[in-house]
Amino acid sequence: MISDPTSTDTPTAVVTGANSGVGFHTTRHLVEYGWHVVMVCRSEERGSEALAAVREEYPDARVDLVLHDLGSLDDVVVLSDHLRALPRLDALVNNAGLYRPSLEHTADGFETTMGVNHVAHMLLTLRLEDRLRRPGARVVNVSSEGHRSGRLRRAPIDAILRGRQPKFGGVQAYSDSKLANVLFTREIVRRWSPDGTVAFSLHPGVLSSRIWDNTRGFVRALSFLIRPFMEDPEVGGRATAACVTDDGLAEDDNGAYLKKFEVVKAAPDGLDDDLALELWRVTEEAIRPWLSDDGSAPP
Ligand SMILES: NC(=O)c1ccc[n+]([C@@H]2O[C@H](COP(=O)([O-])OP(=O)(O)OC[C@H]3O[C@@H](n4cnc5c(N)ncnc54)[C@H](OP(=O)(O)O)[C@@H]3O)[C@@H](O)[C@H]2O)c1
């Protein structure tokens, strides 16, 4: 499904959750800027429709579709092996995200919100370390202003990752996962920026996307109330694409958290280096069986 795999002249970005909302519009904008985009989607039907829409708008686009479910870490391993075979990989946009109102688990026993929004993306990023830990490479983690309500110190992090804390709340789990996105970005920059990697996290805006469809109760009522004020997901896609392509940002603000197009200060917990390190270590331990075939760090 990958077009002209021998060509190495076009910068290449991978966008997860590319069939809808922020991911779809990030793809559109990167294609418009001349990038080759690999769209990672889980549904063949939704992915093919989105791919066709991009190709219809940009007939000369270099855009490809791969089908993988981030709810399965085995599938993330297959995805990363596929991506490592690309002739170029310049940017990884960890965008796919979901909200779950009640406690669910992924195939691997992680709480689903944390499992998809944080754990799967951390595994994908670490398995691509040899491609991303170098000058010119970028990682963009789509977070949310919701990270400000994240409370990763309220229980042992491993218990939060696996949904084993006493009382589950969908909003808390989502906020925790978005705080994890901010902290993961911070730790990537601490570890990999000496080798040239640039990374950002961002809030893409309050957007009228499908992510609200799974909300219940108060959050659902709130989403109906604020829907008239929500922005088009195109704005979030443009902001995310700017994190990939803006050279000024890379020079001055490596590791920054952005609210759409503006660098702002993350919540105090999002600036906590000890928490960032602890989250990295605990998650790395939890995903060790998938890091490489023998459980060691990937080459
Ligand atoms: N919308 C907002 O107001 C808002 C605000 C702040 C932050 N964000 C963040 O923006 C990001 C994108 O969300 P969105 O608003 O664009 O929502 P969306 O339209 O629902 O898009 C989410 C994308 O993630 C994909 N996805 C979900 N679970 C997946 C899985 N297990 N494997 C692979 N892909 C999966 C979805 O695929 P399917 O179509 O197959 O479900 C979809 O492509 C999320 O990280 C979200 O937290 C959104």
Image (cartoon, rainbow, N blue to C red):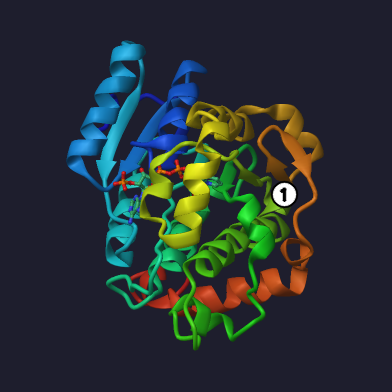
Q: Residue 250 falls in which quadrant of the image? A: top right
Q: Is residue 298 visible?
A: no
| Residue occupying the point 41% across, 60% down | 216
Report the residue marked by disc 1: 255
Q: Is residue 266 visible?
A: yes
Q: Is 143 on the left-hand or right-hand side of 166?
A: right
Q: Nearer the viewer, residue 68 or 7?
A: 68
Q: Nearer the viewer, residue 245 or 48?
A: 48
| Residue occupying the point 57% across, 40% down | 206
Where 72 falls versus 140 (above or below)? below
Within 10 Å of disc 1 (Cα), the crowding (few <14, some 14-19, many 20+) is many
Residue 207, position as x, y percentages in the image = 52, 37
Residue 133, position as x, y percentages in the image = 59, 51
Q: Is 79 on the left-hand or right-hand side of 143?
A: left
In what element is the residue under mark 1?
loop
Residue 68, position as x, y percentages in the image = 27, 51
Q: Quadrant of the N terminus?
A: top left
Residue 211, position as x, y percentages in the image = 42, 47
Determine the residue located farthest toward the left in the rendered image.
45
Question: Is the distance from the Cβ of mark 1 to the nearest ligand 1 atom less than 8 Å?
Answer: no
Where 144 falls versus 249 (above or below)? below
- Name which residue type carries label 1: Gly
Q: Is 159 on the left-hand or right-hand side of 3?
A: right
| Residue occupying the point 40% across, 32% down | 24
